[in-house]
Image: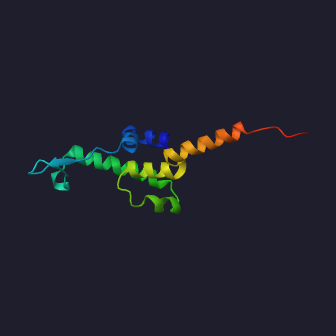
Amino acid sequence: MRDHIIGQDYELWDIVTDGHLATTKKNGEGVDVPKTRADCTAEDLNKWEKNAKAKKWLVCGLGLDKYNRIQSCTSAKEIWDTLQVAHEGTPQVKRSRGALLYSQYENFTMKEG
């Protein structure tokens, strides 16, 4: 998947792994709030377009069961993180899986005959 997305557009992979840069502005109270479409610059629209392309490439290869897991995700990074957890597990699951495999290796013995 990585090579395919990079082959399409190198910046798309950065969006998948790092997330698209949020397009925000300061409101009257100095708090960052998301920009509306009317407030967006050409650069902001380009970020949104790249995120949409990255989402398209991630979703195109999924079956219905995987799509149901990610249909509520709003960014390519959210989709990627959800798919990673579904396929690889959380870091805690990875550690316990590694410990189990190591334990099985340590207990490996040859049987008589």
Where in the figure is residue 67, as x and y percent of width and height?
A: 47, 60
Where in the figure is residue 38, as x and y percent of width and height?
A: 16, 55
Identity of the residue drawn at 28% across and 44% down = 21
Image quadrant for the C terminus?
A: top right
42 or 18: which is nearer to us?
A: 18
Q: From the viewer's perspective, tell me whether residue 108 is left or right of residue 90.
A: right
Query: In this picture, is 13 found above or below 89?
Result: above
Q: From the viewer's perspective, tell me whether residue 10 is left or right of residue 102.
A: left
Which residue in the rendered view is the most extreme toward the left?
Answer: 28
Colour pattern of the rendering: rainbow
Identity of the residue drawn at 31% across and 49% down = 49
Where in the figure is residue 48, as x and y percent of width and height?
A: 29, 49
Query: In this picture, is 62 found above or below 106?
Result: below
Q: From the viewer's perspective, tell me whether residue 50 is left or right of residue 87.
A: left
Where in the figure is residue 20, as x and y percent of width and height?
A: 32, 45
4 or 23: which is nearer to us?
A: 23
Identity of the residue drawn at 21% across and 45% down = 42
Q: From the viewer's perspective, tell me whether residue 109 is left or right of residue 92.
A: right
Tally the numbered discs. 0
Identity of the residue drawn at 35% across and 56% down = 74
